[in-house]
Image: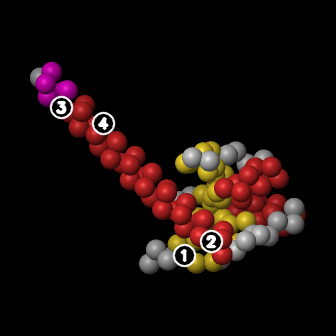
């Protein structure tokens, strides 16, 4: 019985590790996509929908932290992100406009293609 419990525990933690690796890989892919959009749209803050949040990374995250007080989180070496819930998008659009910040909001469509809102 103890061996079965040990095997189940190890399998459980291995499953969690696989999920965490997938999440990190997906997050890195999203980060790369946002960085390309930042290069293409220099001078504008790039917001990308990720699940139930809109996020910004890098220098855009720093600006939003400094101006709007959003909490930063590090996602990879020297790259931070900020975010706010999708349900609050109108509030943040108003705050961005109020602070004369130029921005573009992006989402992924059903075909997983990035579209500007």
Neighbour tally class for label 1: few under 14, some 14-19, many 20 plus, Cα within 10 Å: some
Residue for point 82% across, 53% down: 67
Left or right: residue 110 versus residue 83 is left
| Secondary structure category for the residue under label 3 | helix
**Camera-nearest residue between 106 and 86:** 106
Pinpoint residue 48: horizontal percent, then vertical percent: 61, 65
Mark closer to the observer (2, 3): 2
Highlighted range, magenta = 2-7
| Secondary structure category for the residue under label 4 | helix
> What residue does disc 2 label?
37
| Secondary structure category for the residue under label 2 | helix
Ranked by sequence position, the earlier of labels 1 and 4 is 4
Q: Which mark is residue 114?
A: 1
| Secondary structure category for the residue under label 1 | strand
Ranked by sequence position, the earlier of labels 4 and 3 is 3
> What residue does disc 3 label?
7
Residue for point 54% across, 75% down: 114
Residue with the most extreme top position = 2
Q: How is colour applied across the structure in the image?
A: secondary structure
- Residue 46, located in which quarter of the rendered image? bottom right
Q: Which mark is residue 13?
A: 4
């Amino acid at each position: 019985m103890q061996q079965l419990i040990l095997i189940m525990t190890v399998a459980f933690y291995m499953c969690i590790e696989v999920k965490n690796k997938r999440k990190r890989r997906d997050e890195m892919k999203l980060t790369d996509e946002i960085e390309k959009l930042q290069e293409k749209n220099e001078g504008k803050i790039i917001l990308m929908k990720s699940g139930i949040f809109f996020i910004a990374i890098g220098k855009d995250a720093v600006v939003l932290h400094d101006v709007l007080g959003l909490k930063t989180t590090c996602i990879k070496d020297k790259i931070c992100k900020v975010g706010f819930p999708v349900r609050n998008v109108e509030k943040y659009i108003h705050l961005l406009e109020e602070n004369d910040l130029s921005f573009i909001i992006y989402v992924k469509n059903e075909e997983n293609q990035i579209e500007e809102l």
